[in-house]
């Protein structure tokens, strides 16, 4: 019996439903821990977040040692 291939978008939706604060690195860590091949791309991750209505917060941060 062949193993069913997991849909990456569905995997992201399921993980973000449980914890909407997960970032891309954490999602990819969960993906690898579940023994799935490859990785989840940044584009797909943010596209799924947007479609779920999860807003991303952007902010500029300056280092103290910048001129």
Image: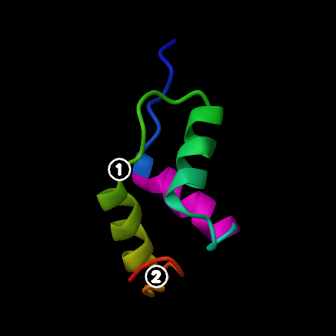
Q: Residue at x 47, y 38 (%)?
A: 6
Q: Alpha-carbon distance for marks 2 and 1?
A: 16 Å
Q: How many marks?
A: 2
Q: Left or right of 23: which side holds 2?
A: left
Q: Residue at x 45, y 87 (%)?
A: 59
Vertically, is 19 above or below 56?
Answer: above
Q: Residue at x 52, y 62 (%)?
A: 13
Instruction: Tell me where residue 61 appears, x and y as whole percent.
Output: 48, 83
Vertically, is 63 above or below 45?
Answer: below
Vertically, is 1 above or below 24?
Answer: above
Q: Main secondary structure of the magenta part?
A: helix
Q: Residue at x 52, y 30 (%)?
A: 36
Q: Left or right of 41: which side holds 22?
A: right
The stretch of residues the image draws in magenta is: 9-18
Q: Quadrant of residue 51?
A: bottom left
Residue on which the image places disc 2: 56
Residue on which the image places disc 1: 41
Indicate which disc, 2 or 1, sits on the residue closer to the N terminus.
1
Residue 12 part of the magenta-drawn span: yes
Closer to the camera in the image, 34 or 64: 64
């Amino acid at each position: 019996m062949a193993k069913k291939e997991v849909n990456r978008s569905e995997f992201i939706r399921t993980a973000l439903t449980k914890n909407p604060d997960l970032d891309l690195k954490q999602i990819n860590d969960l993906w690898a821990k579940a023994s799935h091949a490859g990785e989840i791309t940044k584009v797909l991750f943010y596209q799924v977040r947007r479609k779920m209505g999860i807003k991303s917060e952007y902010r500029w941060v300056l280092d103290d040692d910048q001129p």
